[in-house]
Structure formats: structure tokens, C-alpha cells
Amino acid sequence: MQGAKQVSQTLSHDIVIVGGGLVGASLGCALAPLIDRYGWRVAIIEGAALPESSQEASWQPSFDARASAIAEGSAQRFRQLGVWEAMQCEAAPIKRIHISERGRLGAARLSAKELGVSALGHVIPNAWMGRVLHRQLQQLPIEWYCPVQVAQLTPQASGHHLMLSDGRELTSALTILADGGRSGLKEQLGISSRRYSYEQTALIAHVGVSQPHQGVAYERFTADGPIALLPLPGQAMELVWTHTSGAEQARLALSDREFLHQLQAAFGDRVGRFTRVGQRFSYPLSLVTAEEPVRPGLAVLGNAAHALHPVAGQGFNLALRSVIDLVEALEEGAQEPRALGDMQTLLAFEQRRAQDRANVIQFSDGLVRLFGYSLPLLSHARAAGLIGLNLVGPLRRSLARRAMGLER
Ligand SMILES: Cc1cc2nc3c(=O)[nH]c(=O)nc-3n(C[C@H](O)[C@H](O)[C@H](O)COP(=O)(O)OP(=O)(O)OC[C@H]3O[C@@H](n4cnc5c(N)ncnc54)[C@H](O)[C@@H]3O)c2cc1C
């Protein structure tokens, strides 16, 4: 995509989205009908260059080597945005989920069939989601500034002033902070965050398996840390192996052969033999929540608003629900009509989000705490929990519907 032309005057926009990652790009796509209806001038500013062609294997911070579990509810939302058909080309459906603990009897199983749905979710490479979303954005009248960083964000009488790293200046009535929370802009604005480090690091990689995975996603709690394996198209799976922070370094440094050997020993042979491993990446895991998700003329979305432990694969799914709710709130505000960035509109949005966000944080954080410690008694409680999960049908169904993003 082309950067905007260099001009000396300050450019004014109705909406500026800071960050064209998974969340910022999804929001851009979701705004299409409102841009059409109200003629809003919308811009996305993205700091990292995007891979120019679909052949190029270079990574961008949001659309990196990870694959994400996309809940059925999110698939429905992508359908609304008109991108699901393309997303599906590289997606693998999750037909069953198998949760177990190595060395213990308990196992919980969930299947799409028993819940009457075609899939419990879908696993899609982040890089592919990025390509599909950006291709869609190219069709829309959205101005795209890339690669350029927002260096400074300053509130002004009606909205914000943005200073870009290449010296350009913009103003916006409504600014959406979707920068992933690592750029320091939130702090610059004085928005504090609650942070809790899990002291855990996720090691992720694509692995080859000798048996067809048949659409089963595994979550296995082992003495070497929780191992999640998500089905990918073909005989491949996405590995998310959680380590106590620091312990992942030794595994990152192993030869492929030794790494596969250790993975096999820790996970067992439910998927047959691990045949190959791609490039390995690591992500330190924390729970971070922004204290003020909205302010006059500003909304904080995605990882900037809430970074979660990936154990339940909920972070982006939650963020996509925020994207849709924000667009609905903006539509209602426009009908009143209220100015873009009006606090009444943003508070209505935040009220819709608060409960869902609290539920998902509690659910993900609760899972980490339940399975994160290795006290013997707790192990029994966990096993009982896993067995119980199989027995208590309505609870299990409700849990599954929540994980699928069909229930809030
Ligand atoms: C190991 C792991 C596995 C996960 N698995 C799942 C899963 O299975 N399912 C799920 O739902 N979620 C999952 N998540 C969570 C999911 O990845 C995040 O919710 C999602 O990436 C958040 O996207 P984002 O766009 O908010 O932030 P990011 O992905 O961090 O994107 C932010 C973007 O903003 C840009 N940017 C930053 N600063 C600036 C600036 N100053 N100016 C301009 N641009 C800027 C960056 O270049 C980047 O493109 C997982 C997370 C991890 C760590």
C-alpha cells in the first residue's frame, strides 16, 4: 500500500486508527458502511511495513508466525465484514477439543457435533488474516499511512493532534488507540494500566505430525508447562508451549531434532510423531488492562485495552466483539446526531463492553491459576474438574458457547 503524500499543512480526519494490526485493520473494515453513509474521513497509521506480496515471508508485529483460534462467533463477525470467505481458504476447523493432564485420569472433551455446530472454532495463521484484512482495506476509501509511527498524541479542544515520526501532523475528532499497548502512547496520555506478569513465556511454532489431526485441538497440562496444539490445514499443528519465564531460552536454543524429542516426551503420542518444527518464537505473558478505555475523543481497543494469557485463545475474539460494538455505538451517535468522539457515545460503548471483558478476563485468568500450579491436592481438584466438566452437560455447553464467542 502507498503512504500518503508529503504535505506541509495539518490534515484533519474524522477518525484516526493508531495501529493497523489485527484489531485496527478489523475496525477499518467494520467502518466501511458508516464511511459510505456519513462520508467520514478515516485514516489508519501503521508503524511497521507490511509484506508487499503474499509470497514474501517477512513478519509484521501483529501478523506474525502465530495462528489464532477464531471462535465461531468471530467467524460470524468476519462474515459480516465480508472477509470470511477469504479467511477460510487458510483456516482449519476445530471439530473437537481435548483437555487433559499428563499422568492423570481426567480428560474433558468437547465436540462440535454434540453442540450441534459445524465447528467449535477455526485456526487461522495471523499472517493470512493480515493479508485478507489489508486487501479488503485497499478497496475502501481509507487513508493509509505506513510505515510511519505516531510519535505524539495530544488532546485538544475537539479531539486529538497527532505528530507522526516523519514530521507529518494530523488532527482527528475520534482517535482509536489500537497500537497493541507497547508504543508508550497510552502512558503519554496519562492512561495507566493494571499489570500482572504471569512470569510465563509462550513458545510458539508450527509443527508437523505423523497422524491426521482430524480437527482436534489439544490442551495438555504437563510437568513441563501447558501445551496447546491447534489444528492447521494439512498434517500440521500450531504449538503454544507455556514455560516459566527464562526456561524457554534453553528450548529456543535446541536443535530441531532435540526440540522435537523433548516435545514428544512432554506431550506423548496422541498426534503420532512430531515430524518437523518451523521457526520458534517467544512471547512473555501478562494480564494488562487499561484503566480508562475511553476518554473524550479517544477509545482504546485490542491489546492496548486488554492483553490476556492465550490459554483460552480469547484475546482477539474479545477485541473483535469490541470492534463491532464500537461501530454500533458510533452509528447510534451519528443518528442522534452527536459529534464523533462525544463522551455519551463512548460511554455507551464502554458500558456494553465492561461485562464481557470482565467475564473473559476472569475465565482466562482463572484457567491459568487453576492449571498453573503443581500442588498435589490441586492436581486432584483439577482432575476432578476435568472429569466433572464431562459430566455436567449444561455447564460444559455454556462454557463451550462462551469459548465459541456465542455467549457473553
Ligand atoms: C502466543 C499468543 C497466542 C495467541 N492466540 C490467540 C488465539 O488463539 N485467539 C485469540 O483470540 N487471541 C490470541 N492471542 C491474542 C491476540 O494475538 C491479540 O489479541 C491480538 O494480536 C491483538 O491485536 P492488536 O491489533 O490489538 O495488537 P498488535 O497485534 O500488537 O498490533 C498493534 C499494531 O500497532 C502497530 N503500532 C504500534 N505502535 C504504533 C505507533 N506508535 N504508531 C503506529 N502503529 C503502531 C504495530 O506495528 C502493530 O501492527 C494470542 C496472543 C499470544 C501472545
Image (spheres, rainbow, N blue to C red):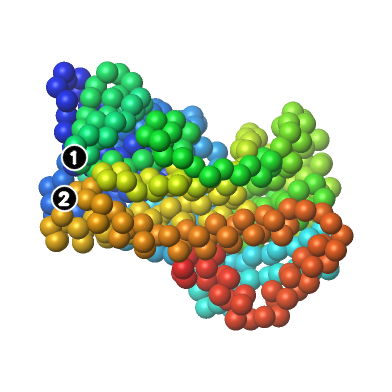
**C-alpha gap between disc 1 and disc 2:** 9 Å
Inspect the image, locate mark 2, and give the three-letter code of the amino acid beneath it.
Ala
**Residue ID at (52%, 78%):** 116
Q: Earlier in the sequence, mark 1 or mark 2?
A: 1
Q: Position of residue 226 (x, y in %)?
A: 73, 51
Relative to the observer, which residue lies in front, 390 or 206? 390
Indicate left or right for 290 with 201 as reference: left
Q: Position of residue 205 (x, y in %)?
A: 64, 41
Rate crowding at label 1 as few (under 14), some (14 to 19) or many (20 or more) other CA atoms within 10 Å: some
User: For mark 2, what is the residue?
Assistant: 339
Relative to the observer, which residue lies in front, 73 or 189? 189
User: For mark 1, what is the residue?
Assistant: 158
Quarter-wise, where is residue 1 in the image?
Answer: top left
Relative to the observer, which residue lies in front, 92 or 199? 199
Answer whether labels 1 and 2 touch (C-beta < 8 Å).
Answer: yes
Inspect the image, locate mark 1, and give the three-letter code of the amino acid beneath it.
Ser
Relative to the observer, which residue lies in front, 281 or 157? 157
